[in-house]
Amino acid sequence: MENTPATATDPPVEALVEDVYITLKFTWSSKEYTVSIAESDCVLDLKDKLFSVTRVPNERQKILGLVKGKLPDDSVRIAQLKFSPSKKFTLVGTPAGEEFKEISEDQLPDVVNDLDLQIDAASAEAKSMAQDKRNIRKILEAAKNLSINVMYPLRPGKKLLVLDLDYNTKPLTSGILPAEECARPGLHEFLELAYRHYDICIWSQTKWTWLEAKLVELGMVGDESRNYKISFVLDHIPMFKVFSVRDGKPFSHAVKALRIIWEHFPQFGPQNTAHVDDLSRNFVLNPGEGIKISAFKLDGTSEAQNDHELEKLGRYLAWLASHTDFKEVDHKNWKKIARALKETGHNMLGFKLEVPAKVQGTERPIYLDMQATTPLDPRVLDAMLPYYTDQYGNPHSRTHAYGWEAEAAVDEARKQVADLIGAESKDIVFTSGATESNNMIIKGVARFNKEKKNHIITTQTEHKCVLDSCRKLSEEGFEITYLPVQSNGVVDLNVLEAAIRPTTSLVSIMAVNNETGVIQPLKEIGTIVKKHRGVYFHTDAAQAVGKIPLDVNAMGIDLVSISGHKVYGPKGVGAAYVRRRPRVRLDPIISGGGQERGLRSGTLPSTLVVGLGEACRLARLEMKLAALLPRLRSTAAGVVMTDRAGVLKI
């Protein structure tokens, strides 16, 4: 049988196969495109379509902003993706045949020598250039013709940091060697610190092809593990030439006019924008906002790791962020300020860190009591500090920027906690700790269901706050069954199932015991509980969260108690997971303004909440280390049990 070629009268494939088609918009190489994809297609099909439009190979595609977090596996159906509301994303990648090999002459900055130009912000020349009609017209034309693709949303209340990333003399990299070797020491740590206070723009005096490749190679975009985001990127296109005087002679050069950005984002201006570059001429139209740093030219040398420019700059920018008006600060002396901050006991975060002196003869032993509490992770402290000193708004204030930025921070923390246990962010209720969460859940569920169900099941080895909550309920007329555990500390599943009655409302069994470390079979318990309609499964997971994988849906868990200080977060904050679908109802034990879905009234301590969220984010990223815990535990036990002078065996 011969193949019949398609004719103009043949219907399109879309008409032959009934399906739902979605139109997605995406930006690539500063241009906008659209692509149509069927819900039955897979992520692989989407990548193939993007390749047909852009010629960017699938393995080189970085798809940003289409879904929250990392793009799922190629086999996942389009219908299963949770798109962003705009269904718009950014594609980063170099087309086949145009891979970065070397930089052509026309991609280099227009001036590559070291003879720079400096203009004092208060000088007559600076004022003349700022008021020049041509320059103003060029700024407005550039702003009008510029389409800025925002890769990550700008956050209320943040300052703006504009950073250079050029080929020859670069403050962030030195581009001769591979990216991992030419990145300036401390690059990602610096960007993480800056992101606490600033939205970040990369503005490079090179072409987009090179800039895109470099950002991906450096891991500055497309790497979800980074604790910072680049909000938007500009290349050489919005730059234009101005005419200055150097050594008494006319001098033309390109310039980065910040007003171009301000025209697009009026929340930014000279009062809250800092521009970092190694060439002063790039900010001659905005000399008051310019921070000049030295170029990095040590790539591939042993001296490279002695470069501390970004460490000093990070300390200065953190200090600068505490100012409400940047116009009051002269950046010419930024290095002296950074040095003074260090000499006077200020760390990179810009605050004075005083550690009490140790008293002779009071040396403490190595701390191993991690089940009682954990030390605060320094990265968690970094995340918390801005909400003590600068972003101190009430997260429940809905009428001004201080409240909006605090609310946004709380929402992000809520998502970080939810992600750690496989939950939806709306199911997370913030509390003062696991003790409050246990009280709220056990008493709340029991009291809400007391008319029809008055029976609760727990174990004899629970934390004291669980046992005391049950004792209090027994005084109110509730029936409590305290299950024994087997010799290995694990609950007998047959005994558990036999204990469930028609009047049972709650089964509360802790995930990991705080004294013995016994791990209960949560998934199996959840399966048993789900056989009985109207019975909810609660687990006190204070000792489990961040140490063993938890998935509330896979394990059939309805309620979870979480503690901040058991996961390298701050004390005084915790969370409760309260399932909404199907909904678990409970009576609140604290009355007031109705915050946290009406389950836990009171103003949230946004600083502590941010710390809990960051601790959970880090725990999720570093969960793979949990596989080492059994081996570390047995090794440590062997060392402790060895006969040693001064060691008390317990």
Image (cartoon, rainbow, N blue to C red):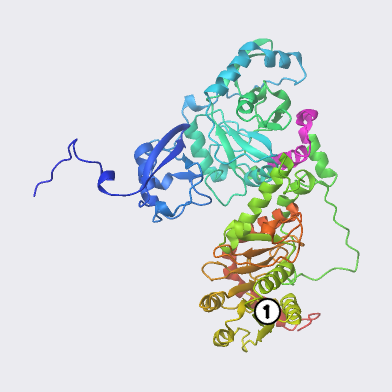
Q: Which stretch appears magenta? A: 307-335
Using residue 33 as the reference point, say whether residue 555 is left or right of it.
right
| Element class at badge 1 | helix
Closer to the camera, 87 or 75? Answer: 87
- The secondary structure that most of the magenta stretch takes on is helix
| Residue 318 rendering spot, x and y as whole percentages | 74, 41
What quarter of the picture does the C terminus occupy? bottom right
Magenta highlight on residue 330? yes
| Residue 564 rendering spot, x and y as whole percentages | 71, 63
Asked if residue 293 is positioned above or below residue 501 in the image, the reply reads above
Residue 178 visible, this angle: no
Closer to the camera, 557 or 514? Answer: 557
Magenta highlight on residue 316? yes
Point out the residue furthest to the bottom here.
487
Closer to the camera, 397 or 619? Answer: 397
Label 1 crowd (10 A; few <14 / some 14-19 / many >=20) = few
| Residue 48 rendering spot, x and y as whole percentages | 35, 45
Q: In which quarter of the image is residue 123?
A: top right
Tell me the residue at 60%/28% (across/down). 264
| Residue 229 rendering spot, x and y as whole percentages | 60, 44
Closer to the camera, 167 or 164? Answer: 164
Q: What residue type is labelled 1?
A: Ala
Q: Quadrant of residue 365?
A: bottom right
Asked if residue 167 is positioned above or below residue 577 in the image, the reply reads above
For mark 1, what is the residue?
A: 637
Using residue 17 as the reference point, say whether residue 561 is left or right of it.
right
Asked if residue 575 is positioned above or below residue 203 in the image, the reply reads below
Point out the residue furthest to the right here.
360
